[in-house]
Amino acid sequence: MARKPDSHHVLPLFCDDLIASCVDMTPACFGAYMRVLCYAWTRGGVPDDEAACSRITGGMEHGDWAVIRGRLIALEDGRLSHQRLELERQAVAELKAKKAEAGRKGGRPKANGKQTESKTKANEKQNESKTKAPTPTPSHLENTHTAREAENEWRQPGWAATEWAAFVAVWNSTQRAAKWDGLTPPDGWVDAAASPGWLKKARQAMARLPRCQYFGNPLAVTQFIQPGWADRIIAGEFDNAKAKNGRQADEKTPPKAWKDEYRPAPYRSPKQLAGLTPELGITEEDL
């Protein structure tokens, strides 16, 4: 377990989460994003301005600012930062306050060149608490499925890698699902998994996927994670097989339009037509 930073000289990075959440970034965009995070960590935020942040990052390519800006939150002073980064900043402040308090308690004068009895007992209690058990995890970072899916709650470090490993294991063993051989999730999977309730619906949809006869070819995971697809599979929209004409088997075929064979009338000269007028009751005015 990594040591908690006690100053803003150390920026804690959770590598699994970082890699999984930045799979949609180009290398240049990722480098600019890391510079923005470092600047926000040491200075309390970055300006909500593309030109200013471009100077901070040393330049950004077209479209990079929109990708980076979408991962940041607005602070009370109008600047931007990252939600997880601000939680870690609060943890650093709390740790520094605890160390300062411990320093004040331990700064009492010694008696006859030796530690006072109260300080000795305090140190013994502190060492005993360290050997018993680690500090319990805060409730908002509890490692439970319910906590990870709760809306607006920050996820535990490594949640993306953990959830992806569980998801892809089920996906690759599911009938009518195209196998995913990549080491990292496809673009958009992390955003979908972070949506409240999506992981639960995804499991239900994967359980129903073998019944979806509509998919003659295995369904790609990139299609599955698109908005609404899990709901459509759960609703049974794809249970029936797809017919050759593109409709499902239970759809009625539209009636065919009646078509008679065209047969042109035989040619008749004006003289022949004139001879037919008495039989047909046609007068010269009609002609």
Image (cartoon, rainbow, N blue to C red):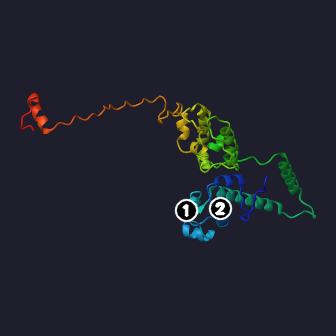
- 120 lies left or right of 184: right
Image quarter where the C terminus lies is top left
Q: CA distance from mark 1 to mark 2?
A: 13 Å
Q: Is residue 19 above or below residue 139?
A: below
Amino acid identity at mark 2 = Pro
- 203 lies left or right of 111: left
Q: Nearer the viewer, residue 159 or 228?
A: 228
Q: Nearer the viewer, residue 176 or 245?
A: 245
Q: Residue at x 59, y 36 (%)?
A: 205
The spot of residue 16 in percent (x, y) is 71, 52
Q: Secondary structure at mark 2?
A: helix
Q: Which residue is mark 2?
A: 27
The spot of residue 83 in percent (x, y) is 62, 56
The spot of residue 225 in percent (x, y) is 58, 44
Q: Nearer the viewer, residue 241 or 126?
A: 241
Q: Which dot marks residue 170? A: none
Question: Based on the displayed image, in which of its 4 quarters is residue 45 positioned?
Answer: bottom right
Amino acid identity at mark 1 = Gly
| First of labels 1, 2 by sequence position | 2
Q: Which residue is mark 1?
A: 63
